[in-house]
Image (cartoon, rainbow, N blue to C red):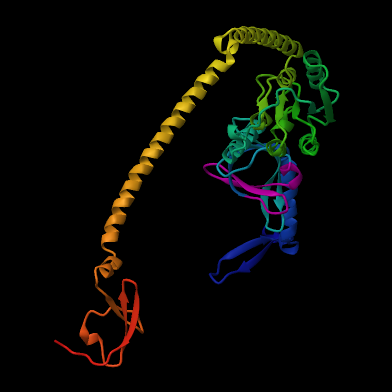
Amino acid sequence: MLDNFLNIKTNQESLVYFPKEINENFFTVSEISKEIKTSLEHKFVNISVLGEISNVRKPSSGHVYLTLKDKNSQLQAVVFRNAASKIKFELKDGMEVMSFGSITVYEPRGQYQLIINKIEPKGIGALQLAFQQLKVKLEKEGLFDRAHKKPIPFIPQKIGIVTSPTGAAIKDILNVMDRRFANVEILIYPVKVQGEGAAQEIAEAITELNNFIDIDVIITGRGGGSLEDLWAFNEEIVARSIYNSKIPIISAVGHEIDITIADLVADKRALTPSEAGELVVPRKDLLVEKIEKFKARLLQSLAGKLKLSKEKLTRIANSYAMRRPFDKLNRWQQRLDEFAQRLNLNITHALNTEREKLSAIAGKLESLSPLNVLKRGYTITTRLEDNKSLRNIVDLSKGDKIKTNLTNGNVISEIISVEKR
């Protein structure tokens, strides 16, 4: 039996035996990896794995790399771009998920990994989780705030409708509007309301309708269905197009129990497409009835006011003032004459009083006048050159010329000598 083995003597003098065929035909590392890969891929195909997400990485390639783990082990996993684009919710660390895919080996590193084709959160549907995640995100950004809600016009002249042209929703809306207010202009923008590309079409339609200057309000929605059927109205692109719309928007998606992101962002939510038709226009017959009532009340009010005005005019026409219109004017004229007479008397008295005061002041001034002094035989002497009065002998010198003022003239003199006392 030992003939099939090779004897190799070690430094410790012990013997080790190797099979001759292995010694003669070694496996390469790549061959071993391929064998393992083939074995794993054959056995672990279309399997379901329950685990907690960690180490989520999203490079620019669009692939998603993550680790699935439990208390004792961990498994590397990858979601390639095509599959990742179909995931509605956001993959986050710590989330417990159910992954569906197959085991393979990444040969360059000799590492086995799970290629995930589908992934769902544990305990809650993927779409429901995606709805909750987007709702929290948009609520934090303020897209649901009532402050941003625009009022719906009472009687719109032109209405834009974004929905499927073949669905039950458009029929319900048109039937209700035709019954309530038949002559409103309607512009239908046909779009897909479910399936791939539906959200993009709805968002583009809302944006396009905002380029029309004559549209007063927009209705967007569809009939009822499953969460998957209604999902286009839970997409972020639709929510942002509604929020950015300058035209008020009514969201009418599904039935009363169906609440979508579009409902929360819209300026008004209709429980059903039929209710959207009721919300967007009033009942014309009720408006006409109300207008007729207002008209009757207005005519009655005008007739009452006209009657009161006529009676008042009659009383005025029969009044003493209107029968003898100049009596009051004459009385006022008489009072005016009295005021004028009193004014003249007051002015005359005031002038006389002031005249007497002025005469008294003039008498006092006359008594103080230098001319009166001259009349009594006195003279006033001034220096000729500057006409200043001379009061002191020291102000004169020999040769100065002086002017002596008398009562009936002046005398010019020259000082011959100055004699001091």
Judge by depth and name the residue closer to the eye, 141 or 295: 295
Please state the extent of the stretch shown in magenta in the rendering: 57-85
Image quarter in which the N terminus is found: bottom right
Residue 283 in sight in this render: yes
In the image, what residue occupies the spot 70% across and 23% down? 154
Q: Which of these two is toward me, 4 or 348?
A: 348
Decide whether residue 64 is among the magenta residues: yes
Q: Extreme left residue here?
A: 421
Q: How many marks?
A: 0
Residue at point 33%, 43% (across, down): 353
Quarter of the image that includes the C terminus: bottom left
Decide if residue 280 is on the left or right side of residue 371. right
Left or right: residue 378 versus residue 249 is left
- How far across and down, in percent of the image, does residue 197 sit? 80, 37
* Residue that appears at 55% across and 69% down: 13
Asked which quadrant contains residue 347, the reply is top left
The x and y percentages for residue 222 are 76, 24
Is 75 drawn above or below residue 239 in the view shown? Answer: below
Q: Nearer the viewer, residue 172 or 283?
A: 283
Q: Is residue 207 left or right of residue 324?
A: right
x then y, percent, for residue 5: 68, 61
Quarter of the view holding residue 242: top right
Residue 52 occupies quadrant: top right
Q: Position of residue 397 (x, y in %)?
A: 26, 91
Q: Is residue 27 magenta?
A: no
Q: From where the camera sits, is residue 145 visible?
A: no
